[in-house]
Amino acid sequence: MLSEQIRQLKEWIHRDLGQYRDSHKLLRTFEVETQSPLEGISRATFTLWTRRNRYAITLHAKLSPPGACYMGCGACSRSWRAGEDWHRGNDLPDGEFSETLWLRILTAILSYELDEPVEPREATLSPTVAYGQLKDEGAGRG
């Protein structure tokens, strides 16, 4: 049921995610389920890992209309926070299978991985002032 969508998703992965151009790596990240041999694949999950999170991009075959497919993505932390015994997670974009949705998912993953910007701090001494002070202090010891 999902053969065409899986083929298309693999093409987008090859195009947009360089480290997954290796077919062996790509195969290790795909998991498929079938309801019956006659119906073919009914669900497929592609998993991405980063240092902090795991992302599961899932395709589900829909019964109607024939050939329709749902695609969604979930994020899950790979480590616990202090005092917690669960992995935090979030739902990322989902909807009808399309390249636009794929790009929205990639953008959401990038956004999820980015750290919060911090306010710049004022330096206590500029490098040139600090060097000048050290030079003057050293010269008087001589």
Image: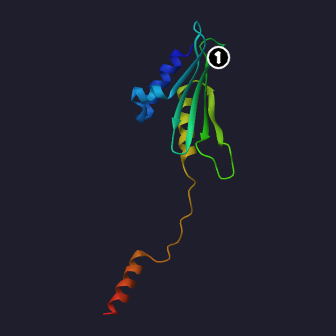
- Give residue 44's position: percent from left, percent from top: 56, 22
Give how far across and how far down residue 61 sits, in percent: 61, 17
Q: Residue 111: which quarter of the image?
A: top right
In this view, the residue in front, 73 or 104, is 73
Residue 73 in picture, x, y percent from top left: 60, 32
- Residue that mark 1 sits on: 62
- Which residue is found at the position 55% from the left and 45% from the top? 52
| Quadrant of res 90 | top right
Element at label 1: loop
Above/below status of 56 relative to 79: above
The residue located at (49%, 73%) in the rendering is 123
Dot 1, how many residues are within 10 Å of its Cα: few (below 14), some (14-19), or many (20+)?
A: some
Q: Which quarter of the picture shows residue 142?
A: bottom left
At a point 45% along the width and 28% down the height, the residue shown is: 26
Q: Amino acid at mark 1?
A: Lys
The image shows residue 94, relative to residue 33, as above or below, that is below
Compared across the picture, whether 128 is left or right of 51 comes to left
Task: Tell me how many marks there are.
Answer: 1
Q: Is residue 136 left or right of residue 55?
A: left
When the figure is inspected, residue 68 is found, relative to residue 118, above or below; the finding is above
- Residue displayed at 64% across by 50% down: 81
Q: How is the image coloured?
A: rainbow
Residue sitting at the far left:
142
In terms of depth relative to the viewer, which is nearer, 46 or 92?
A: 46
Quadrant where the N terminus lies? top right
Residue 24 % position (x, y): 41, 27
